[in-house]
């Protein structure tokens, strides 16, 4: 079976997914919905797909699945609309910035018995998958401590930050998901710190740019997440897992695997500096996993529940910084 | 313009090139020629191309370029046939095992003013390209010494070795081309050694499995090539260039960029162990470069002359081992 | 001038310092005090020094400086005794497990105008010094985040743990000092988590074996410390500093700087697995720095204040875990 | 037993050995012979030894062993003098630049039944020893190919080069010894190339600055040595051994084991840039091995025969470059 796709939203991440669909066997791009005519036309030219409205796509017999790449505040509505329309749904994270809204949305998905996958691309990075495989194969024994170091090359524009829900819900949310995935247990409590170190404008917007979080499960396993909105040396993406029998860690990815040496010492090229180049393979693997789940009628590897739990961890981190205390996940999940 | 391709030969390397053509914008696969019906059908199924005879392809108006992936002893004839037919020609190396035959073939290519590219895929590996870029940018100063370490995971079957022309013409030929490319000067003389260390059967066929070569240019620049048909740890592909101002080297590629640690020490996954996985990007870049040259009517980055020179270096190495002396390239080029 | 030393306590760390004294120009070992005759004799045989009682050493005209390597609960008393005796004092950390006792002791040191250095050996590790030098040279810009990963190969015996004051005061105390040193600002608040994952016996003693701490300064700089009493792969000692202009990190030290490769992949030897081999150079540099300070009448690079502040951070971490909240350093310093 | 030493020659390498003697248990420096009074006095001040003439040392009852650090053209005479005087002899390489003279000298050593160790310090480098241990433990299977990359930071002064015997006898001689040691078989034939690339003055002196050598044993094992008198990035000292079951290689040593990252990429400090810092541990281990052999009356780990064989390989390499052919070791050994 070939899964026939429509992409909702032809912005940067929409293009990433359209390219992934084009590269995955068993997937084809049928239509795009996009309010900006120029962007819609560009995707049509690149992939030979139709331009349709969102409602037309919901009613299209030749569309099996949609990829939601629209602004965050439309995700939950669109998930509900397409779940009801009988389409398999892949939505970019987050489902919504409000945990209550996410919960309502997931109820609709459940009652419609719809297929929903939430886009946590890092789980599909080949190196991160190799880390998870090593854990699953028992190579580190029982997981005890997870370290996630995740730093962006630079902060997004102020406009983006205003609507982002704050660093914990926008940036750390990926790391919360990675930490849950690697811990293999639900988190019980969260402590977090935050500061503004890279740009005072971020502080004026009520956000942080430099945060650290410790997650702890009921059995005592811990995950440490360290984030900065700015790393002068590029897009720093590392994970490390300590277990009872050893350790496994994923290295950063450089622009090229070469070493240079001169009078000043030895050097290596900068890191792959942009999420689209750093995670190219991850995005393709992610869509391939969604296609496989849709084709087989199987469960998706990342679910609406995963989306909700990552958001709950973000809410707990916000509360922890505000109140200067450890916050139980149950406090925010209710 | 879209370059319309036919692939001659649907074996392993033919499939590599067909996949590359499918992934390169501005290229499309129109037809395949392949005597084994099953292999031809498989390529048709994978890429939706026609199955035609070689002569039909030579006469096809809808084919601009051919990729020659047939057995070595047919390369020169096919290059001549398609040069005369007005097609752009990409041929796998070597053009022929006989330098005289290569020379005759290139005369035909020249008289027909045909486009010919010879497949030296390593020049298109992203890391090797980064090494070359560093040299061209002056980051190592004047090139003085090139080191090429190239080891296969294991020897090919005896049948293959018999028809291969020997290790220097079959395996080292890639390294001769890489060395010429990195030295930036033609080689003046060659000394080589050879031995049979991994499998006595290889010796019975009159070949070596463990060889070393030193190339020297007229100005004294030197390249050292070390080859083995067997590296227990996988497909070892390294280059290093010493210049007056520094050094640049390309690292090996591992299956994943992770580190593990346990009671026995630290470990990394094995190397990408097969030329098709190790050089996936190189093969795609190589076809893209050919497509660009054909579309622009420009010179190809690797030429028939490159093919001839690499073969001449192989002939000189053979002579050097046989006669226990330094062999001038002029001795074999005449 | 040659600084004439007595070592108080001929246990493991006493031997480390005696060896360091022997290797440092301008230092000589005159005497040892040690209640176990056999241990005292062994040090006399190794270094040709006298065996004297503690009081005899305090009264000795031929002793300029003492190195206190006795059990923790004697440190403060001995520091006071030798400060009053006019000797320069090097004391192993901690000065005492009670912050009040430390404070009283430092008052005596101050009123005697005595020279006191507290043994935080890691500041003298060549690689950690290179990290600090890079910071001081401005190579990472303004320090923003410090990461300290510190894991022991295995937990000490239960008897040791009972008298240790707990993991924060015994093990993390080194990392508290390293973090203060690298942050370059005093810590304002502390959050910490703790769990028992490696051995339930440790929990029965009221201690943890797996802890994480986030330190934050008033300006928002943060340090993350992650500790485990057990790393199957050895003595893991890493530091990393993110600044506004870049990053600097110290690598772990392996038993040998070699790489091996075989059918299972690539491997490196285990880590230097014992503080005495891992920090051999650090211990020698530490004593050399003390000798230089004593000879020049200069300030010691690590002081009683440093010892007190590291202990205060440990007390704050204990309180943070107990009360599940961020603890201001002012709460424990009073 | 304590071995009582005299050092002959208080130049740079003499100081290295005197320091090594001071650091090795069971060794003591009794005397130095040195024609320059200032240098002799400096060593006396540093180590508290007597200043004596060479003949006085030969007649001294309180000297068990000598370390010969005088100019090369005096080595053979001094070895003979002290062998006859009943002293154990450690001589810097080479014994002499003339193979005939070496042979005569070794006959004297043999007839006197004297202990002689020739200083090939690299065999005592901890990392190179770890490589050798891995081979001896069977971790790479049967040795097949040895690669030695050895590059100096810069050429010595012209005066030194004039008296050096040429690059093969002065610089490559260390690599010849390392290659023999790692191959575990005697070399049968030698091919070499040489050029002048770094400084035309070197060419005017009849020497090369950039050379490559391939050694081959009767069974076909090969070693590749690549040398340059100038590496802009420092003192490059690497060895790698390919065997039937895998590979083992020693890394270069950097000034510190840290990584830095900034906007231009990642960097590491330069290499330890001087043989005295790069091989500090090797020199200490070397003297310790000599002391152990003298104390036990055992064979020395490096012998006069090793010195002779390395020189023979150098002579064969010179002949190979001159005559443009493979040279059998038997041709130079006679």
Image: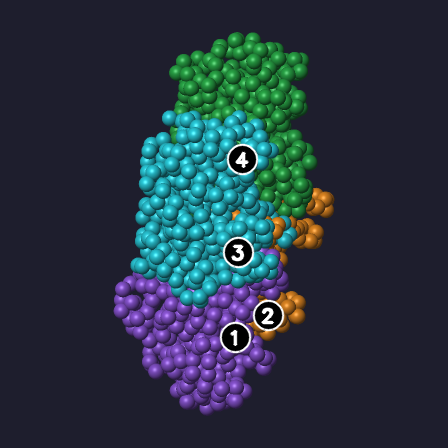
Chain colours: A orange, B purple, C green, D cyan
Of marks 4 and 3, which one's residue comes earlier in the chain? 4
Do the residues indicated by labels 4 and 3 lie within the same chain of the protein?
yes
- Image quadrant holding the C terminus of chain D, namely bottom left
User: Residue drawn at (53%, 11%), measured in percent from left and top?
Assistant: C57
Find the distance from the CA under tag 2 to the CA under tag 1: 35 Å
Q: Depth-wise, is mark 3 or mark 1 nearer the camera?
A: 3
Of labels 2 and 3, the one closer to you: 3
Mark 3 packing: few (<14 Cα in 10 Å), some, or many (20+)? Answer: many
Of residues D48 and C299, which is closer to you in this image?
Answer: D48
What residue sits right under mark 4 in the picture? D34
Q: Say which of C23 and B44 sits in front.
A: C23
- Give the residue at mark 2: A43
Residue A291 visible to an observer of this rendering: no
Image position of B76 with respect to C55: above or below:
below
CA–CA distance in space, label 2 to label 3: 55 Å
Q: Pick the residue in front: A158 or A145.
A: A145
- Seen in the picture, residue C314 relative to D287 is either above or below; the reply is above
Dot in front, 4 or 3: 4
Chain of the residue on which disc 1 is drawn: B
Residue D321, image x and y in percent? 46, 63
For disc 3, the marked residue is D228
Do the residues bearing badges 3 and 1 touch, measured as CB atoms within 8 Å? no
- Which of label 2 and label 4 is nearer to you? 4
């Amino acid at each position: 079976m070939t899964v026939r796709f429509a992409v909702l939203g032809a912005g940067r991440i929409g293009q990433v997914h359209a390219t992934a669909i084009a590269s995955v066997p068993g997937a084809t791009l049928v239509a795009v919905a996009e309010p900006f005519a120029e962007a819609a036309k560009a995707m049509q030219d690149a992939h030979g797909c139709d331009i349709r409205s969102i409602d037309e796509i919901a009613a299209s017999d030749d569309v099996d699945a949609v990829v939601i790449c629209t602004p965050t505040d439309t995700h939950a509505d669109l998930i509900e609309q397409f779940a009801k329309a009988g389409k398999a749904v892949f939505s970019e994270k987050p489902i919504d910035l409000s945990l209550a809204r996410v919960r309502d949305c997931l109820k609709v998905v459940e009652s419609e018995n719809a297929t929903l996958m939430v886009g946590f691309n890092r789980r599909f990075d080949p190196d991160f998958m190799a880390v998870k495989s090593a854990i699953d194969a028992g190579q580190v024994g029982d997981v005890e401590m997870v370290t996630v170091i995740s730093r962006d090359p630079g902060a997004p524009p102020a406009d983006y930050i205003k609507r982002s829900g704050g660093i914990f819900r926008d940036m750390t949310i990926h790391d919360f998901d990675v930490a849950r995935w690697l811990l293999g247990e639900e988190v019980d409590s969260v402590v977090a710190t935050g500061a503004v170190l890279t740009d005072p404008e971020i502080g004026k917007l009520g956000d942080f740019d430099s945060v650290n979080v410790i997650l702890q499960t009921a059995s005592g396993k811990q995950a440490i997440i360290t984030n900065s909105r700015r790393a002068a040396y590029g897009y720093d993406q590392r994970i490390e897992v300590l277990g009872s029998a050893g350790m496994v860690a994923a290295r950063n990815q450089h622009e090229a695997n070469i070493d240079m040496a001169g009078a000043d010492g030895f050097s290596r090229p900068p890191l792959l500096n942009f999420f689209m180049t750093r995670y190219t393979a991850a995005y393709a693997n992610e869509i391939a996993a969604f296609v496989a789940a849709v084709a087989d009628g199987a469960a998706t590897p990342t679910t609406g529940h995963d989306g909700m739990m990552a958001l709950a961890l973000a809410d707990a981190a916000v509360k922890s910084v505000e109140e200067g205390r450890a916050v139980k996940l149950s406090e925010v999940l209710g």
